[in-house]
Amino acid sequence: MPGKSITRQQVKLYMSYRKNHSQVKSAAKAGISERSARRIEIGEHQAQQQQPRQYRTRKDPFNGLFEKHLVPLLKDNPALQPITLLDVLADKAPEQFDNSHLRTLQRRVKRWRAKEGPEQEVIFLQRHIPGDMGISDYTWMNKLNITLNGNEFKHKLYHYRLVYSGWTYVQVTLGGESFESLSSGLQNAFWRSGGVPMTHRTDSLSAAFKNHSEKTLLTERYAKLCKHYGVNATRNNKGIAHENGAIESAHGHLKRKIDQQLMLRGSRDFNHLADYETFINLIVAKINRQCKTRFEEEKPHLHVLPSRRTNDFSELHVKVNSSSTITVKRVLYTVPSRLVGTALLVHIYDDRLALFYGHELTLTLPRLYAQGSTRTRCIDYRHVIHSLAKKPNAFRNSLLRDDLIPHGDFTLIWEQLTQNVLSDSDCKYMVDLLVLADNYACEQALGRYVLSALEQDKQVSIKQCRELFGPDTIEVPWLVSQQHSLTSYDCLIGGLHG
């Protein structure tokens, strides 16, 4: 139409009509002239560009105060937040600004940062190569409120992931980011995946790197581990977690999957640690099934495994003292009294201690961890109860008395016995009960039986307990002996006259 510019929308509308209609009809439907239609088709017509607005639609509420007072502050400290800057404005111009101006100030600060603010860090997407890198990291699981047999279970997960395929291995870690847990988890991941990547990356684990050194230096044990498997060890820069983004983001996905499965399960309590580990393994198996195709592509690029594993433990030489105890990493453990005075070699794993006398494995103990600067104890009454039975009064003031009593019914039995006064007969009674529990392997049933009687103001005798929980019959083997003649002894010493 004469005197009016043709807009972009009219041009698009004309071209859409032109597919099915004549030039004249299309121009009429689009509201333009035939001459303009011809110019559009031969490429001579340019639609008028809408000019940006150069004026304000309302009065600036800051009236130059933003440029005068806030811009200098932003140039010195670009991290200042709008809520803080609003307080500055309120001080400079009292009673002019309140929270109703916050949204306008946020937009103004955002515009200033886009036009004049400092450069920001850029994340460069990476091209992942099959078999190139595996990443290890640890993640806390406490927020999921997992319990074992009703008790709070604070722990971490060791998480290994092949960057190219996303194949995953997860292991429950009881004692934090130690070398034992790193070595055990990493070796299990290598052997489970069937190969070794070219590079293994972690963050600045103290078990792997000497972080007080300016250079990137490996700890001696971690260097030997990497050399054994022929893998190059690297780490991300300190404090820059996104450099391990291939596993940092996977932490969140993994924990969300675990949380969802816990919701479906209807309970966050597990009877045993093994039940919880099975639960985790099933979730990880589902994750690995989803990346099976890419993992099959990556497997041929993984290096061949060595002929055997290497150590995933540390060693400590200890001597069993006269109390039949040893101390390992600020934890006191009891051992069988037959080992008193002997020197033992302890292999310290993440979840257990293996005790060797010479080259022979003598005993395996569950490993406990001291919390902070406090010490803790791992006491098993079965190790020392028969020695204590010879002098039961020593139980009365023993430093280990409360630890020797098994938790549960036996703790309640001791409270019932000592609620008025602590006597020697009470100590002997408790020691005899523990001896019976060990001899007849009836700790749970014996504790329930004795406690039920005490709750009814009755105390069953040790004889009654022995008759009830002891074996029904005692089989005495029939021994057949033959008396040799004295002449055979003469023959032994060389005849009648020697």
Image (spheres, rainbow, N blue to C red):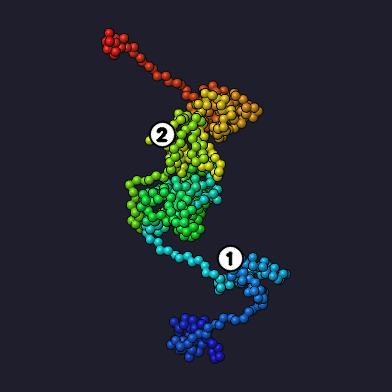
Residue at image mark 1: 79
Residue drawn 63% across and 79% down? Answer: 56
Which quarter of the picture shows residue 420? top right
Looking at the figure, which quarter contains the C terminus?
top left
State the residue at coordinates (53%, 42%).
370
User: Where does residue 273 sit, x and y in percent of width and height?
Assistant: 49, 43
Q: Nearer the viewer, residue 297 or 183?
A: 183
Q: Which residue extends farthest right?
A: 95
- Element class at badge 1: loop
Q: What residue would you read off at disc 2?
A: 357
Q: Position of residue 46 (x, y in %)?
A: 49, 86
Q: Nearer the viewer, residue 458 or 93?
A: 93
Q: Which residue is depicted at the point 55% across and 51% down?
A: 143
Image-based side of 123 in relation to 96, left or right = left
| Whole-percent x, y for residue 357 in the image | 41, 34
Q: Is residue 277 visible?
A: yes
**Residue flagged by tag 2: what amino acid is it?**
Tyr
- For marks 1 and 2, give the CA distance: 62 Å
